[in-house]
Amino acid sequence: MLEAKDKIENKLGWSLDARDPKFIELLMPLLSFFYHYYFRVQTSGWHHISPQEKVLFVGSHNGGLAAPDMSMMMYDWFRKFGLERPIYGLMHPTVWEVAPDIAKIAAKTGAVIAHPKMAYTALRSGASVLVYPGGAEDVFRPHHLRNTIYFAGRQGFIKLALRENVPIVPVISAGAHDTLIVLTDLYKVLQQFHEWGMPWLFGIDPVVFPIYLGLPWGLGIGPLPNFPLPIPMQTQVCKPIVFERYGREAASDRQYVNECYELVVSEMQQELDQLVKLGAKV
């Protein structure tokens, strides 16, 4: 039993120990180039965060697998709070399975597998955690939904915040979803073929199957890696959201969890609407 537990904890993504500040330091000049010159990021709201306080950052994913707003947010954290103060990001299990080499690099920057066990472990270690609840459906949502907060109804992050008594800090961005143009998602069509007997490629359900315009493919089909276009981005760290009740009982109350979820989505949408308007005036 103990051997099985040790085996799981030693697997990539199942430990906090892979994070390497020296490796992050090597990446900082590259991240700085993308931040200042490629995406020309404008950011605001970091004054809402206390360096000593652990929080649950909740973001809306953008820009395909490149997710440039995520890396720019991480760069902001590193330069403001230093490389030694840990923050861990929850990364979809499929990435760890399909692209282990990329996952190893991500783990050195603080990525862990998106599983409740790792989320709780990270918070209880005193670190902050970054989660993108919408996952693949969010990061590849069609272009006409680029300014819409979309979490696909996933409420696990609410239960996490309630159980661990931590505030939720929304992180939003405008411009990142223009770094590729998602035309549509054909997943439901492929799902129907799968039900008729067509196997998934590599035996893995892709969850989404977008068609998009972007680099390097021109026309990209499926959840392929992409290189983001040099679109200016705005990022914002919003005011922390603190709920009325916390604890296990609150996390087990379905109606209360749903109310908290709707509150977070509503407030994030309002903040995003304002950020988009501000960008249009610039």
Image (tube, helix red, strand yellow):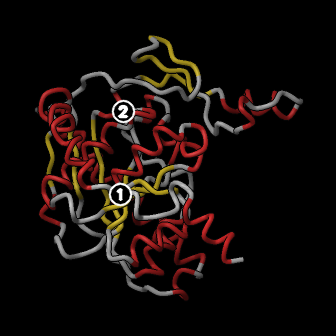
Name the residue: 37% across, 76% down: 125
Nearest to the observer: residue 268 or residue 66: 66
Pick the residue in front: 31 or 174.
31
Residue 170, image x and y in percent? 32, 59
- Is 64 placed left or right of 238 in the picture? right
Mark 1 Cα within 10 Å, few/some/many (few <14, many 20+)?
many
Residue 93 is left or right of residue 214, and the answer is right
Determine the residue positioned at 58% across, 81% down. Answer: 253
* Image position of 36 (left or right of 249): left
Query: In the displayed structure, would residue 165 be above or below residue 266?
Result: below
Q: Looking at this rendering, what residue extends furthest in the front direction? A: 3
Q: Nearer the viewer, residue 49 or 10?
A: 10
Question: Which amino acid type is shown beneath numbered disc 1?
Answer: Arg
In the image, which disc is placed on residue 19? 1
The image shows residue 279 at horizontal and vertical percentages of 18, 36
Query: Which label belongs to residue 177?
Result: 2
